[in-house]
Amino acid sequence: MPHHHEPIPTADLTTVTLRTPADMVAVLPYLIGYHQDNTIHLALLDGDHLQAVLHRELPEQSKDVADFVTDTVHMLKRNRAAAVVLVGHGPGETVTPVMDALAPALSAQHIDVIDMIRYENGRCWSYLCSNPACCPPDGVPYGTFTSSAVAHLVAAGMVAMPDKETFEEILQPGQAQEREAMTRATVTARVRAEAMLNAPNLDDHYWFDEGRRCARECFEHVRGGRLIPAEDLAWLGILLTAVTVRDIAFTICCEDGPDVAQQFWTEVTRRIDPRYAAAPATNLAFTALRNGAGSLARIAVNRALQAEPDNSFARLIATALQSGITSSAFEDQTNVDDLVTSITQHATQHPRSARPVLPTPPDDITP
């Protein structure tokens, strides 16, 4: 944004004021989670507050610009965007044609373009500011190490990975010793579950009650800053294969707010046996999407679909992400107390819906 615009503070737990194009460019990797190349960022504004940041890869060929603009306009209209800052990374010959086509298309839909910024090689330019005092022709330097806005985000615990590949390692399993421990624990948990599923006198309501108990116990470990024991985590993975248990576990983890819930589901998804990752990864994707962490939601939903390609909830979230739906779409739409009541009533009326649905074990895994 040119200097003569009003400062734009972000609206989150940490309030950061963005005064210049350089400020906006510097904070983007922290808002997204990693540094991106050849991308256009769409910073949606609600008054003076940054509501969400969407991002799309720039079209590689000029013939694709028209379709890119059409899709981007539709994405912003779905999110009821009233104002936007366009920020493109890359050389002028790639970014400028997109900006030139996108700006009038947005204006035609009554979406205000507050600023248009290009950045590359440590410098940024505003297309809308012609004042050489604040926006010289050779650009303005920006840097994550010199920005006070970035300093505030770092102090709040936000990080920016160097690239997408590094960011995706957030959900990669741990070291070999940890993976081996989880494999052993999962085999033991599966044997236990198979025996109980075949037990003739087991109360039908056992599985829902046990799923709720186990989810809460595991959540208390994370809430207290402790690692979930492998045995407990493996048993939780078994129990989460029932949709009813998956859903009640989601509500339990909402009790301390979205950040703790996101931390919980991240740990479970990262450490759990990959064959049991669909349920926790889907809960992580939904939690991250509601929390405005779209990049994390994407890698989580990919993990879920790797484990279970036909998972309907994961596919729905993937569609929402592909459409550019932001966290604002979920505001005041999910009453957790109502969810608990609905899920519990369903489990009471249909107790067998909480029975685990065990995946086919690989041939090389034996107890």
Image: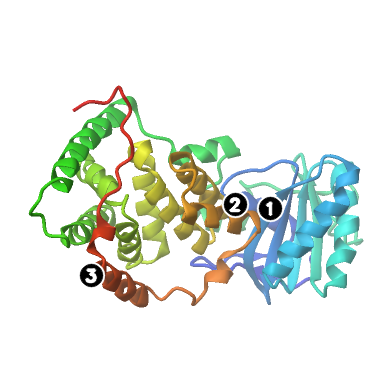
Q: Residue at x 84, y 47 (%)?
A: 95
> Residue 162 sits in which quadrant?
top right
In the rendered structure, the answer to whether residue 348 lies left or right of residue 46 reads left
Q: Where does the N terminus fall, quadrant-wise?
A: bottom right
Q: Secondary structure at mark 3?
A: helix
Task: Return the residue at label 1.
Answer: 55
Q: Position of residue 179 (x, y in %)?
A: 31, 30
Q: Which label belongs to residue 32?
A: 2
Instruction: State the separation of the CA atoms marked 3 and 2.
Output: 41 Å
The mark that comes first in sequence, 2 or 1, is 2
Residue lying at 64% horizontally and 49% vertically, measured from the top left: 146
Is residue 74 shown left or right of residue 11? right
Q: Which residue is mark 3?
A: 348
Question: Which dot, 2 or 1, sits closer to the camera?
Answer: 1
Residue 181 location in percent, x, y? 24, 31
Q: Please state if 38 lies on the left or on the right of 264 as rendered.
A: right
